[in-house]
Amino acid sequence: MKIWKFKLEHERTQIIKMPLKSEIMDIQMQVDGISMWALCDPDTEEIEVKINMYGTGWETHSNDKINDEYLATVQQGGLVWHFFMNHEFLNTETDPYSEMDEIWAHIQDQDIMIAGLFKLLEDKKFVNPDILEDGTNIDISTR
């Protein structure tokens, strides 16, 4: 692991390329502008992360608010900047959540299959062996 420095621009949203295994440590003003430091594993593949910067009183991206993680607040003269990292990875080839998306899609497919099976059973009027034709339940503990 190494500590790397990343230069940040005065932009509301910016894309930073960094190793997949990185932990942002701090953001501060330096003589030459705003810098971000992160503990990085340079041997992991590179991903793109979205950094959002908001001034005090600014509107935030309504759809990003839930996914944003607060990083730091930086004062620049009379201005105050608040930095957040958006957890929607932009490089889908290295997105660690893509496997979860596949699992979720599989679960949804299974739900559709189960609903279809219940509909088929209902249409075919299959009889529950524990219920007599007159609707009374059979006590299976006595079988």
Image (cartoon, grey):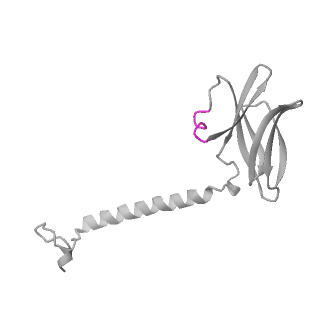
**Left or right side of 59 for 47:** right
Which corner quadrant holds the N terminus? bottom right
The reply to whether the magenta stretch includes residue 65 is yes
| Residue sticking out furthest to the top | 78
User: Residue 106: x percent and y percent?
Assistant: 50, 62
Which corner quadrant holds the C terminus? bottom left
| Residue sticking out furthest to the right | 31
Q: Residue at x 75, y 45 (%)?
A: 24
Q: What range is drawn magenta here? A: 61-67
* Residue 141 falls in image quadrant: bottom left
84 w.r.t. 130: above or below: above
Q: Residue at x 74, y 54 (%)?
A: 21
Residue sitting nearer the eye, 132 or 41: 41
Residue sitting nearer the eye, 73 or 47: 73
Residue sitting nearer the eye, 13 or 112: 13
Residue sitting nearer the eye, 9 or 75: 75
**Left or right side of 53 for 33:** right
Q: How many marks?
A: 0
User: Residue 119: x percent and y percent?
Assistant: 31, 62
| Residue sticking out furthest to the left | 134
Q: Residue at x 65, y 40 (%)?
A: 69
**Dominant SS in magenta:** loop
User: Residue 74: x percent and y percent?
Assistant: 76, 29
The reply to whether the magenta stretch includes residue 114 is no
User: Residue 107: x percent and y percent?
Assistant: 47, 61
